[in-house]
Amino acid sequence: MTRVQSRQLAALAEDALDEVKARDVRVIDVRKLTTLADYMIIATGTSDRHVRSLAERVVEQATAAGCKPLGVEGQEAGEWILVDLQDVIVHIMLGKIRDLYKLENLWDMHAGPAEATR
């Protein structure tokens, strides 16, 4: 996937999260930090049901755009769901889980100017 395509996919995932009212959506450009992905997206849901709905919407939108997820983990518990969109990895968490793990801190200290917060 090219850089433009991965950025478009990140924007698509961000829009899907916004449509279902995700909170504190962060898009972090990690291209210079890892070969694992180009972008990490972290979002908060208000309940386990909301977290599941957010993940479902991201999967639906990505699939409709021709990017079937490589995997979706954590749907059963609904506290932290990871959606692997190849070069874009989406983490959707309950607030208490996000506060506990502070996942964005792993990337924020090294993130470049392309980082976006919505």
Image (spheres, grey):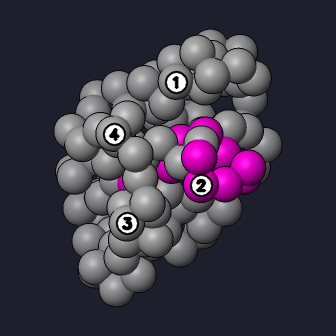
The label number, if any, that marks residue 33 in the structure image? 2
Q: Which residue is mark 1?
A: 7
Q: Which residue is mark 3?
A: 109
Q: Is residue 24 above or below residue 102?
A: above
Identify residue type, mark 3.
Met
Question: Can the viewer see residue 51 in this picture?
Answer: no
Q: Nearer the viewer, residue 17 or 41?
A: 41
Identify residue type, mark 4.
Pro
As for residue 97 lying within the magenta part, the answer is no
Please report contact status of discs 2 and 1: CB closer than 8 Å, yes or no. Answer: no
Q: Which residue is mark 4?
A: 113
Q: Quadrant of the C terminus?
A: top left
Segment tinted magenta in the rendering: 32-42
As for residue 37 lying within the magenta part, the answer is yes
Relative image position of residue 32 (x, y in whole percent): 59, 46
**Mark in front: 4 vs 1:** 4
Q: Secondary structure at mark 3?
A: loop
Q: Quadrant of the N terminus?
A: top right
Q: Residues within 10 Å of mark 1 (few under 14, many from 20)?
A: some
Q: Residues within 10 Å of mark 2 (few under 14, many from 20)?
A: few
Please report contact status of discs 4 and 1: CB closer than 8 Å, yes or no. Answer: no
